[in-house]
Image (cartoon, grey):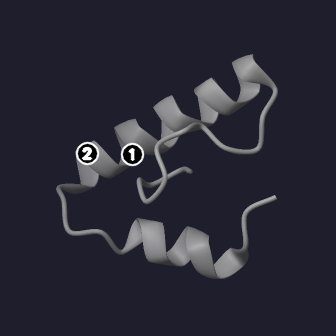
Amino acid sequence: MPRLQDIFTNMSVKMPVRRKIYLVLRNNMIKIVKRQSCCGHAGEPGC
């Protein structure tokens, strides 16, 4: 289970908002499909 601090740190990465939204959706879908708590892209939004 990711820590709340990690979620905010990952969302503060400097990149366009559209890219952040895309990464959040993609990384969460990877976690759902693989039934894991991490998508394997540490430091990206949504992971």
Residue depicted at x 48% and y 30%: 26
Image spot of residue 45 (x, y percent): 44, 55
16 above or below 37? below
- Residue furthest top in the image: 33
Q: Are marks 1 and 2 in contact (CB under 8 Å)?
A: yes
Q: Secondary structure at mark 2?
A: helix
Q: Toward which corner of the image does residue 31 lie, by quadrant?
A: top right
Q: Toward which corner of the image does residue 39 lie, by quadrant?
A: top right
Residue depicted at x 78% and y 34%: 36
Residue depicted at x 17% and y 55%: 16
Q: Toward which corner of the image does residue 2 lie, by quadrant?
A: bottom right
Q: Amino acid at mark 1?
A: Ile
Image spot of residue 9 (x, y percent): 47, 77
Q: Which mark is residue 21?
A: 1
18 above or below 39? below
Q: Is residue 47 left or right of residue 45?
A: right
Image spot of residue 20 (x, y percent): 34, 51
Q: Secondary structure at mark 1?
A: helix
Mark 2 highlights which residue? 18
- Separation of marks 1 and 2 at Cα, in angstroms: 5 Å
